[in-house]
């Protein structure tokens, strides 16, 4: 089975789609008043219009992993400068350096790295780095 897509509701499709394109390097395939289709990393992201405020469950978020703590700090500064709603400062956690920010419509994102995580949390990060090196 292959991971195919993510789908998110939004009361402002253009603003939510623009966040994905501008800040998360997605490409926009389609944008209409009721939906947007974006692509990133071999899968689709669908943004669908809702005529009500979307309420996300506590702590529901999407996580993006960066290669280093410096990359996390650089992204934090860039997003903050561009007016993205920051939910935390950059902080170090046992699972690595990270921060949380919010897209229009309230969707929460965690931007992190496991490069500086405690050893017990590095396994999947190190497997991915080896796989990327082989490519």
Image: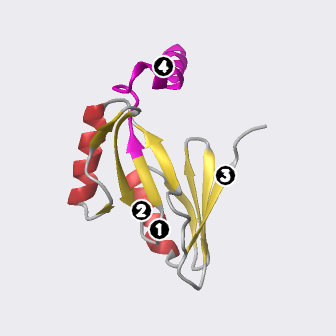
The residue where tag 4 is placed is 126
Disc with the residue nearer the chain's start (4 vs 3): 3
Q: Quadrant of residue 69?
A: top left
Which secondary structure, mark 2?
Answer: helix
Tell me how far mark 4 sits from mark 2, CA to CA: 29 Å
Q: Quadrant of residue 8?
A: bottom right
Q: Residue furthest right?
A: 1
Tell whether 26 sits left or right of 112. right
Q: Is residue 120 magenta?
A: yes
Rendered residue at 79%/37% (across/down): 1
User: Which of the numbered marks, if any, corresponds to residue 5?
Assistant: 3
Tell me how far mark 2 sits from mark 1, CA to CA: 5 Å
In this orientation, does residue 99 appear? Answer: yes
Q: 10 Å neighbourhood of mark 1: few (<14), some, or many (≥20)? A: many
Q: Position of residue 23 (x, y in %)?
A: 37, 54
Residue bounds of the magenta highlight: 111-135
The mark lying in front, picked from 4 and 2, is: 4
Rendered residue at 37%/53% (across/down): 100
- Placement of 62 over or under 93, stated as above or below: below
Which secondary structure, mark 3?
Answer: strand
């Amino acid at each position: 089975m292959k991971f195919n897509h993510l789908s998110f509701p939004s009361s402002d499709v253009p603003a939510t789609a623009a966040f994905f394109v501008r800040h998360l390097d997605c490409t926009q395939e389609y944008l209409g008043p009721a939906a947007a289709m974006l692509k990133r990393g071999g899968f689709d992201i669908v943004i669908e219009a809702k005529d009500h405020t979307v309420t996300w469950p506590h702590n529901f978020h999407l996580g993006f992993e960066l290669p280093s703590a410096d990359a996390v700090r650089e992204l934090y500064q860039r997003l903050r400068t561009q007016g993205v709603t920051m939910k935390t400062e950059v902080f170090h956690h046992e699972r690595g350096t990270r921060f949380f920010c919010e897209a229009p419509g309230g969707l929460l994102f965690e931007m992190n790295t496991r490069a500086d995580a405690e050893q017990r949390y590095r396994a999947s990060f190190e497997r991915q780095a080896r796989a990327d090196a082989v490519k």
